[in-house]
Amino acid sequence: AALGAHTPHDKATAASKPIPMPLPAQVRILMSQHIGAPAKALVKKGDEVFVGTKIGEAGGFVSANIHSSVSGTVAAVEPFRLSNGRTCDSVVIKTDGKQTVDPAVQPPVVTDKASFMAAVRECGLVGLGGAGFPTHVKLTAKNIEFLVINGAECEPYLTPDTREFLECSDTIISGIAAVMKYCEIKNCVIGIEANKPDCIAKMTELVKEMPGVTVKPLPSRYPQGAEKNLVENCTGREVPQFGPTGAPGLPADAGCVVMNVTSVSTLGTFLKTGLPLVSKRVTVDG
Protein backbone atom coordinates (compact mmCIF):
# COMPACT_ATOMS: atom_id res chain seq x y z
CA ALA A 1 0.00 0.00 0.00
CA ALA A 2 1.14 3.54 -0.68
CA LEU A 3 2.26 5.16 2.54
CA GLY A 4 2.22 8.83 3.45
CA ALA A 5 -0.09 11.65 4.40
CA HIS A 6 -2.85 12.86 2.10
CA THR A 7 -2.21 16.53 2.85
CA PRO A 8 -4.35 18.82 0.68
CA HIS A 9 -2.13 20.44 -1.94
CA ASP A 10 -2.47 24.18 -2.37
CA LYS A 11 -0.19 25.04 -5.30
CA ALA A 12 -1.58 28.56 -5.62
CA THR A 13 1.69 29.95 -7.03
CA ALA A 14 2.25 27.22 -9.66
CA ALA A 15 1.33 29.53 -12.55
CA SER A 16 3.18 32.58 -11.15
CA LYS A 17 6.35 33.73 -12.89
CA PRO A 18 9.13 34.30 -10.32
CA ILE A 19 9.57 37.88 -9.12
CA PRO A 20 13.21 38.90 -8.58
CA MET A 21 13.82 40.11 -5.02
CA PRO A 22 14.86 43.77 -4.79
CA LEU A 23 18.60 44.12 -4.22
CA PRO A 24 19.41 44.96 -0.59
CA ALA A 25 22.02 47.64 0.24
CA GLN A 26 24.06 44.99 2.02
CA VAL A 27 24.14 41.18 2.04
CA ARG A 28 25.70 38.71 4.43
CA ILE A 29 26.75 35.45 2.80
CA LEU A 30 27.43 32.61 5.22
CA MET A 31 30.31 30.22 4.65
CA SER A 32 28.09 27.37 5.83
CA GLN A 33 25.20 26.84 3.41
CA HIS A 34 25.56 23.09 3.00
CA ILE A 35 25.92 19.84 4.91
CA GLY A 36 29.58 19.33 5.92
CA ALA A 37 32.53 21.56 6.70
CA PRO A 38 32.09 25.34 6.26
CA ALA A 39 33.90 26.98 3.35
CA LYS A 40 36.99 29.11 4.05
CA ALA A 41 36.56 32.78 3.17
CA LEU A 42 38.78 33.85 0.24
CA VAL A 43 38.16 37.62 0.41
CA LYS A 44 38.96 40.44 2.82
CA LYS A 45 37.53 43.84 3.67
CA GLY A 46 37.82 46.26 0.74
CA ASP A 47 37.91 43.59 -1.98
CA GLU A 48 35.73 44.15 -5.05
CA VAL A 49 33.47 41.22 -5.90
CA PHE A 50 31.06 40.44 -8.73
CA VAL A 51 28.16 38.06 -9.32
CA GLY A 52 29.80 34.63 -9.50
CA THR A 53 33.07 35.58 -7.74
CA LYS A 54 34.24 32.68 -5.58
CA ILE A 55 34.33 34.09 -2.03
CA GLY A 56 34.58 30.80 -0.13
CA GLU A 57 36.67 27.69 -0.85
CA ALA A 58 35.30 24.26 0.13
CA GLY A 59 36.74 23.41 3.55
CA GLY A 60 37.07 19.66 2.98
CA PHE A 61 35.73 16.82 0.81
CA VAL A 62 32.20 17.17 2.19
CA SER A 63 31.93 20.92 1.70
CA ALA A 64 31.06 23.36 -1.08
CA ASN A 65 32.43 26.49 -2.71
CA ILE A 66 30.46 29.68 -2.05
CA HIS A 67 30.08 32.42 -4.67
CA SER A 68 28.89 36.00 -4.41
CA SER A 69 25.33 36.61 -5.61
CA VAL A 70 25.93 40.38 -5.85
CA SER A 71 28.50 42.85 -7.15
CA GLY A 72 29.99 45.34 -4.72
CA THR A 73 32.65 45.75 -2.05
CA VAL A 74 33.43 43.47 0.90
CA ALA A 75 32.59 45.44 4.05
CA ALA A 76 33.63 42.74 6.55
CA VAL A 77 34.54 39.10 7.02
CA GLU A 78 33.26 38.18 10.46
CA PRO A 79 31.81 35.34 12.52
CA PHE A 80 28.03 35.00 12.57
CA ARG A 81 25.90 32.93 14.94
CA LEU A 82 23.69 30.37 13.21
CA SER A 83 20.23 29.23 14.30
CA ASN A 84 21.75 26.06 15.82
CA GLY A 85 23.92 28.16 18.17
CA ARG A 86 27.17 27.53 16.30
CA THR A 87 29.13 30.28 14.60
CA CYS A 88 30.64 30.36 11.16
CA ASP A 89 32.41 32.99 9.08
CA SER A 90 30.34 35.30 6.93
CA VAL A 91 31.20 37.74 4.16
CA VAL A 92 29.37 41.08 4.33
CA ILE A 93 29.13 42.83 0.95
CA LYS A 94 27.97 46.40 0.29
CA THR A 95 26.14 46.11 -3.03
CA ASP A 96 26.79 48.54 -5.91
CA GLY A 97 23.40 47.95 -7.59
CA LYS A 98 25.00 46.94 -10.90
CA GLN A 99 24.92 43.14 -10.58
CA THR A 100 28.00 42.90 -12.81
CA VAL A 101 28.93 39.30 -13.62
CA ASP A 102 32.54 38.37 -12.83
CA PRO A 103 34.66 38.57 -16.02
CA ALA A 104 36.22 35.24 -14.93
CA VAL A 105 32.87 33.45 -15.40
CA GLN A 106 33.46 31.12 -18.36
CA PRO A 107 31.96 27.73 -19.24
CA PRO A 108 34.18 24.96 -17.84
CA VAL A 109 36.08 22.72 -20.26
CA VAL A 110 34.70 19.23 -19.67
CA THR A 111 36.14 16.29 -21.59
CA ASP A 112 36.03 13.35 -19.17
CA LYS A 113 34.85 12.23 -15.71
CA ALA A 114 37.67 14.02 -13.87
CA SER A 115 37.05 17.40 -15.54
CA PHE A 116 33.28 16.93 -15.09
CA MET A 117 33.67 16.28 -11.35
CA ALA A 118 35.99 19.30 -11.07
CA ALA A 119 33.28 21.42 -12.74
CA VAL A 120 30.56 20.15 -10.39
CA ARG A 121 32.77 21.03 -7.43
CA GLU A 122 33.73 24.44 -8.84
CA CYS A 123 30.03 25.29 -9.34
CA GLY A 124 29.44 25.05 -5.58
CA LEU A 125 26.48 22.81 -6.40
CA VAL A 126 24.53 21.35 -3.49
CA GLY A 127 21.14 19.65 -3.25
CA LEU A 128 18.54 22.38 -3.78
CA GLY A 129 15.62 20.36 -2.48
CA GLY A 130 16.53 21.51 1.02
CA ALA A 131 19.22 19.18 2.38
CA GLY A 132 22.15 21.07 0.85
CA PHE A 133 24.33 18.00 0.36
CA PRO A 134 27.39 18.73 -1.87
CA THR A 135 26.64 17.23 -5.29
CA HIS A 136 30.23 16.28 -6.19
CA VAL A 137 30.32 13.96 -3.15
CA LYS A 138 27.11 12.23 -4.25
CA LEU A 139 28.42 11.72 -7.80
CA THR A 140 31.59 9.91 -6.64
CA ALA A 141 29.48 6.79 -5.90
CA LYS A 142 30.45 3.73 -7.97
CA ASN A 143 28.25 1.28 -9.89
CA ILE A 144 25.27 3.59 -10.24
CA GLU A 145 22.58 2.24 -12.58
CA PHE A 146 19.85 4.84 -12.09
CA LEU A 147 19.87 8.62 -11.94
CA VAL A 148 16.62 9.59 -10.21
CA ILE A 149 15.50 13.20 -10.69
CA ASN A 150 13.41 14.42 -7.76
CA GLY A 151 10.64 16.59 -9.13
CA ALA A 152 8.02 15.22 -6.74
CA GLU A 153 7.61 18.53 -4.91
CA CYS A 154 5.31 16.86 -2.37
CA GLU A 155 5.23 19.75 0.13
CA PRO A 156 1.73 21.23 -0.04
CA TYR A 157 2.62 24.85 -0.92
CA LEU A 158 5.95 24.68 -2.75
CA THR A 159 6.16 25.37 -6.49
CA PRO A 160 9.83 26.14 -7.44
CA ASP A 161 10.32 22.70 -9.05
CA THR A 162 7.16 23.25 -11.11
CA ARG A 163 8.53 26.55 -12.40
CA GLU A 164 11.91 24.92 -13.11
CA PHE A 165 10.27 22.27 -15.30
CA LEU A 166 8.20 24.86 -17.18
CA GLU A 167 10.89 27.55 -17.61
CA CYS A 168 14.23 25.71 -17.68
CA SER A 169 13.58 22.37 -19.38
CA ASP A 170 16.60 22.86 -21.67
CA THR A 171 19.11 23.02 -18.80
CA ILE A 172 17.35 20.17 -16.97
CA ILE A 173 17.85 18.01 -20.08
CA SER A 174 21.47 19.09 -20.65
CA GLY A 175 22.29 18.56 -16.95
CA ILE A 176 20.81 15.05 -17.02
CA ALA A 177 22.67 14.21 -20.25
CA ALA A 178 26.00 15.35 -18.74
CA VAL A 179 25.56 13.34 -15.52
CA MET A 180 24.56 10.22 -17.46
CA LYS A 181 27.47 10.59 -19.90
CA TYR A 182 30.35 11.38 -17.54
CA CYS A 183 29.19 9.22 -14.60
CA GLU A 184 28.29 6.38 -17.02
CA ILE A 185 24.73 5.98 -15.76
CA LYS A 186 22.54 4.13 -18.27
CA ASN A 187 19.08 4.94 -16.89
CA CYS A 188 17.33 8.05 -15.66
CA VAL A 189 13.85 8.33 -14.14
CA ILE A 190 12.31 11.78 -13.66
CA GLY A 191 9.77 11.48 -10.83
CA ILE A 192 6.95 14.05 -10.87
CA GLU A 193 3.77 13.97 -8.76
CA ALA A 194 0.60 13.45 -10.84
CA ASN A 195 -0.80 16.84 -9.74
CA LYS A 196 1.63 18.49 -12.20
CA PRO A 197 0.32 17.22 -15.57
CA ASP A 198 1.84 20.14 -17.52
CA CYS A 199 5.32 19.28 -16.18
CA ILE A 200 4.81 15.58 -16.90
CA ALA A 201 3.64 16.29 -20.47
CA LYS A 202 6.50 18.69 -21.21
CA MET A 203 9.25 16.40 -19.89
CA THR A 204 7.75 13.26 -21.51
CA GLU A 205 7.89 15.01 -24.88
CA LEU A 206 11.49 16.19 -24.35
CA VAL A 207 12.96 12.83 -23.27
CA LYS A 208 11.38 10.82 -26.12
CA GLU A 209 14.67 10.74 -28.05
CA MET A 210 16.90 10.19 -24.97
CA PRO A 211 17.85 6.52 -24.55
CA GLY A 212 17.27 5.23 -21.02
CA VAL A 213 15.36 8.33 -19.82
CA THR A 214 11.74 8.06 -18.65
CA VAL A 215 9.23 10.23 -16.78
CA LYS A 216 7.39 8.57 -13.90
CA PRO A 217 4.12 10.13 -12.67
CA LEU A 218 3.92 9.61 -8.89
CA PRO A 219 1.05 9.56 -6.38
CA SER A 220 0.44 12.99 -4.83
CA ARG A 221 1.13 12.37 -1.19
CA TYR A 222 3.63 13.50 1.41
CA PRO A 223 6.55 12.56 1.68
CA GLN A 224 6.71 11.28 -1.91
CA GLY A 225 9.93 13.23 -2.48
CA ALA A 226 11.81 11.61 0.42
CA GLU A 227 14.81 9.82 -1.10
CA LYS A 228 13.94 6.27 -0.06
CA ASN A 229 10.29 6.58 -1.16
CA LEU A 230 11.35 8.13 -4.44
CA VAL A 231 13.91 5.42 -5.25
CA GLU A 232 11.39 2.66 -4.58
CA ASN A 233 8.57 4.32 -6.55
CA CYS A 234 10.79 5.23 -9.51
CA THR A 235 12.95 2.10 -9.81
CA GLY A 236 11.27 -0.62 -7.73
CA ARG A 237 14.47 -0.92 -5.70
CA GLU A 238 14.61 -0.66 -1.94
CA VAL A 239 17.31 1.34 -0.16
CA PRO A 240 18.65 -1.01 2.54
CA GLN A 241 18.32 0.01 6.17
CA PHE A 242 22.10 -0.26 6.53
CA GLY A 243 24.92 0.03 3.99
CA PRO A 244 27.97 -2.29 3.76
CA THR A 245 29.85 -0.31 6.46
CA GLY A 246 26.95 -0.48 8.93
CA ALA A 247 26.03 3.17 8.37
CA PRO A 248 22.41 3.98 7.43
CA GLY A 249 21.65 2.92 3.86
CA LEU A 250 21.87 5.41 1.00
CA PRO A 251 20.38 5.38 -2.52
CA ALA A 252 23.87 4.45 -3.79
CA ASP A 253 23.51 1.12 -1.92
CA ALA A 254 20.60 0.40 -4.27
CA GLY A 255 22.57 1.52 -7.35
CA CYS A 256 20.83 4.91 -7.50
CA VAL A 257 21.78 8.55 -7.19
CA VAL A 258 19.06 11.15 -6.54
CA MET A 259 19.29 14.76 -7.73
CA ASN A 260 16.72 17.51 -7.23
CA VAL A 261 15.43 18.90 -10.54
CA THR A 262 16.71 22.43 -9.80
CA SER A 263 20.15 21.03 -8.87
CA VAL A 264 20.52 19.20 -12.19
CA SER A 265 19.23 22.28 -14.04
CA THR A 266 21.73 24.53 -12.22
CA LEU A 267 24.47 22.13 -13.31
CA GLY A 268 23.22 22.40 -16.91
CA THR A 269 23.39 26.20 -16.65
CA PHE A 270 26.92 26.11 -15.19
CA LEU A 271 28.21 23.81 -17.95
CA LYS A 272 26.73 26.15 -20.57
CA THR A 273 27.57 29.56 -19.08
CA GLY A 274 30.03 29.09 -16.21
CA LEU A 275 27.65 30.90 -13.84
CA PRO A 276 27.87 29.05 -10.51
CA LEU A 277 25.13 28.53 -7.92
CA VAL A 278 24.17 32.07 -6.86
CA SER A 279 20.37 32.09 -6.77
CA LYS A 280 17.37 29.97 -5.84
CA ARG A 281 13.61 30.25 -6.18
CA VAL A 282 11.54 30.24 -2.99
CA THR A 283 7.78 30.08 -2.56
CA VAL A 284 6.10 32.79 -0.50
CA ASP A 285 2.62 31.56 0.37
CA GLY A 286 0.52 30.34 3.27
Image (cartoon, rainbow, N blue to C red):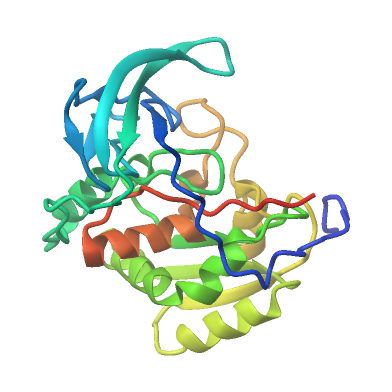
Q: Is residue 142 left or right of residue 50?
A: right
Q: Position of residue 257 (x, y in %)?
A: 45, 52
Residue 104 in sight in this render: yes
Q: Position of residue 50 (x, y in %)?
A: 23, 44
Viewport quadrant of the N terminus: bottom right
Tell me if residue 139 comes above or below residue 207 in the rendering: above
Task: Name the residue: 48% across, 38% down.
Answer: 132
Residue 57 in sight in this render: no
Q: Quadrant of residue 170?
A: bottom left
Task: Name the residue: 18% across, 50% down.
Answer: 102
Q: Nearer the viewer, residue 269 or 245?
A: 269
Q: How many marks?
A: 0
Q: Is residue 129 left or right of residue 218?
A: left
Task: Name the residue: 56% across, 42% down.
Answer: 130
Q: Position of residue 158 (x, y in %)?
A: 69, 55
Task: Name the residue: 52% across, 67% down.
Answer: 164
